[in-house]
Image: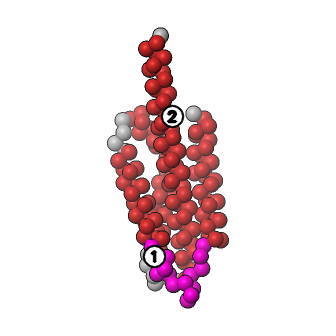
Amino acid sequence: MTLMNATVKTVKNGAVPMFGILTYFLAPAVDSAHAPSTFATFFSTTAQLLGTFLIALALLSSLPALEHLRFRQTMGGISLLYLGLGLVAATAGTVDRWSCWVYRWLFAITAGAMLGTLLVLVMLGAFNIWSARTTAVAKRADELG
């Protein structure tokens, strides 16, 4: 349990911002040779995925009280902030009238938010599988005596 919490904390507080910084330097150039409209597909697809994750998280809010508490502890407020920022950046990236330097920032924010949301959701799924397995093992142990 503590390993899971430490991993989630490391991802939320360290890996995601570092990935955003890395993608800022690796972001493709937007200039006269590479028009902003060429990246509209990336931004619109990412906005759709992040919107889908937002809907999935809204559906998860209907969990029973104890499960909801575990969910909130795993997700945390910072993950929802990443999701919101990524959604706004991805949607803003579909507009082709910004200055060229803005797209590098939008790309970094979108990519970092996408990675953060994916990692937290995967960890949430792994935690749920681990929790269900632990419950099943405890139930079977009680049955066996």
Looking at the rendered structure, the kind of residue marked 1 is: Ala
- Is 62 left, or right, of 95 in this rendering? left
**Label annotation for residue 64:** none
Q: Could you say which is closer to the camera, residue 101 or residue 131?
A: 131
Q: Secondary structure at mark 2?
A: helix
Q: Is residue 88 visible?
A: no
Residue 124 lies, with reference to residue 49, above or below; the image says: above
**Which x, y percent locates residue 97?**
46, 84
Comes first in the chain, label 2 or label 1: 1
> Distance of mark 2 from mark 1, alpha carbons?
39 Å
Outermost residue, top direction? Answer: 145
Residue 99 lies, with reference to residue 138, above or below; the image says: below
Residue 134 lies, with reference to residue 12, above or below; the image says: above
Task: Say which residue appears at 46% left-offset and 70% top-offset.
Answer: 43
**Which x, y percent locates residue 127?**
51, 38
Determine crowd level at label 2: few under 14, some 14-19, many 20+ residues with C-alpha closer than 10 A: few
Looking at the rendered structure, the kind of residue marked 2 is: Trp
Query: Which residue matches tag 2?
Result: 130
- Is 117 left, or right, of 67 in this rendering? right
Residue 136 found in image quarter = top left
Task: Say which residue appears at 36% left-offset and 54% top-offset.
Answer: 55
Placement of the N terminus among the 4 image quadrants: top right
Query: Which residue matches tag 1?
Result: 40
Is residue 11 a member of the stretch shown in magenta? no
Determine crowd level at label 1: few under 14, some 14-19, many 20+ residues with C-alpha closer than 10 A: some
Q: Are marks 2 and 1 in contact (CB under 8 Å)?
A: no
What segment carries the magenta color?
A: 27-41
Is residue 31 a member of the stretch shown in magenta? yes
